[in-house]
Image (tube, rainbow, N blue to C red):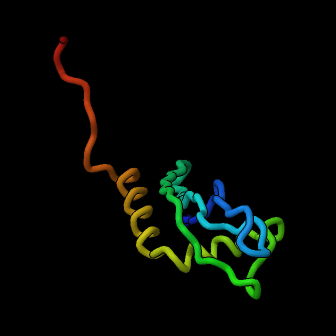
């Protein structure tokens, strides 16, 4: 199976009123996940952050309760380097599938 990427929108910080516009989103708190299934094992990697989004105008304003995940993800993808994020998550999963380091207990009694 190929790697699957998914956005999770955790919360949005809003200005209560911006002129006549209520609940104007200013910052989106997000997680970006990658999942890959290899054989019977599922590998998962995640990054998270908070991104400020541009201020709306009355012409392009969407009421908070009418926002869609696709619209908010579009805001994020216009602000973030998604390709670089996907490369990072892919490397994290590759290291889980083929690790190069490990933590071991000492081979002696303490």
Residue closest to the eye, 86 or 37: 86
Left or right: 94 in relation to 105: right
Q: Answer whether residue 6 is visible to the viewer in this image.
A: no
Identify the residue at image location x=75%, y=79%: 61
Left or right: 17 in relation to 107: right
Question: Where residue 108 sits in the image (x, y, percent)?
Answer: 16, 16
When asked about the image quadrant of residue 102, the answer is top left
**Residue most toward the top?**
110
Left or right: 94 in relation to 16: left
Q: Quadrant of the N terminus?
A: bottom right
User: Does residue 58 lie above or below 95 as drawn?
Assistant: below
Identify the residue at image location x=75%, y=84%: 58
Q: Answer whether residue 65 is visible to the viewer in this image.
A: yes
Question: Where residue 46 sits in the image (x, y, percent)?
Answer: 50, 55
User: Does residue 58 lie above or below 27 as drawn?
Assistant: below
Identify the residue at image location x=37%, y=62%: 91
Question: Where residue 54 sits in the image (x, y, percent)?
Answer: 59, 77
Left or right: 53 in relation to 96: right
User: Does residue 94 lie above or below 61 as drawn?
Assistant: above
Residue closest to the eye, 59 or 82: 59
Identify the residue at image location x=44%, y=68%: 85
**Residue most toward the bottom?**
59
Total label count? Answer: 0
User: Does residue 58 lie above or below 41 as drawn?
Assistant: below
Q: Quadrant of the C terminus?
A: top left
């Amino acid at each position: 199976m190929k790697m699957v990427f998914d956005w999770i929108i955790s919360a949005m910080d809003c200005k209560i009123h911006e002129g006549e516009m209520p609940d104007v989103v200013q910052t989106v708190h997000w997680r970006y996940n990658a999942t890959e299934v290899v054989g019977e094992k599922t590998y998962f990697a995640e990054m998270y952050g908070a991104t400020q989004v541009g201020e709306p105008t009355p012409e392009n304003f969407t009421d908070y309760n009418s926002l869609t995940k696709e619209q908010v993800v579009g805001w994020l993808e216009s602000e973030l380097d998604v390709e670089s994020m996907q490369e990072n998550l892919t490397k994290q999963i590759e290291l889980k599938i083929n690790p190069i380091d490990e933590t071991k207990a000492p081979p002696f009694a303490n």
